[in-house]
Image (cartoon, rainbow, N blue to C red):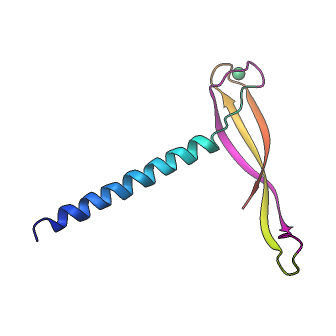
């Protein structure tokens, strides 16, 4: 029975690692950081995120009646600050929940 705790600790560590890797991959995919509009620098960071408006949209699932899927959609204004030229830019982003 003395092996049992190590089994669970190992399993826990495995889960933590795989979740961390998943998060890291998701973050990399989501981080399509734009270039600075003023000096083309990649060193921009998001400093503010405002929801401009939200609405519901309906997806029709293949023309089947009653197969509609209602989603929430948000428009964001993302404000980025450039670390090279210290200027700011705003990018409109639409995100479907
Ligand atoms: Zn810049």
- How far across and how far down the image is residue 35, in percent? 71, 27
- Residue 48 painted magenta: yes
Q: Residue at x 85, y 69 (%)?
A: 62
Residue 84 appears in which quarter of the rendering? Answer: top right
Q: Position of residue 36 (x, y in %)?
A: 73, 25
* Residue 54 vs residue 23, the one in the foreground: 23
Against 79, residue 50 (above or below) is: below
Seen at 77% across and 65% down, the residue is 72
Q: Position of residue 23 (x, y in %)?
A: 51, 50
Instruction: Using the image, determine if residue 13 lies above or below residue 32.
Output: below
Quadrant into which the C terminus falls: bottom right
Residue at x 82% of width, y 77% of height: 67
Residue reaching furthest left?
2
Where is the N terminus found, in terms of image quarters? bottom left
- The quadrant where ligand 1 appears is top right
Quadrant in the rendering for residue 6: bottom left
Does the segment drawn in magenta span residue 54? yes
Placement of 25 over or under 3, stated as above or below: above
Residue 38 location, x and y as percent? 77, 21
Residue 88 sits in quarter: top right
Side of 16 relative to 31 (left or right): left
Q: What span is colored magenta in the figure?
A: 37-63
Look at 78% across and 57% down and name the residue there: 74
Between 9 and 65, the residue placed more toward the observer is 65
Total tally of numbered discs in the picture: 0
């Amino acid at each position: 029975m003395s092996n049992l705790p190590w089994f669970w600790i190992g399993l826990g560590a495995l889960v933590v690692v795989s979740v961390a890797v998943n998060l890291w991959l998701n973050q990399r995919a989501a981080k399509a950081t734009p270039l600075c509009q003023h000096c083309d620098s990649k060193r921009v960071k998001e400093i503010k995120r405002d929801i401009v408006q939200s609405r519901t949209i309906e997806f029709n699932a293949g023309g089947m009646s009653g197969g509609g899927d209602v989603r929430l959609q948000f428009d964001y204004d993302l404000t980025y600050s450039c670390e090279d030229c210290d200027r700011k830019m705003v990018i409109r982003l639409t995100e479907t929940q």
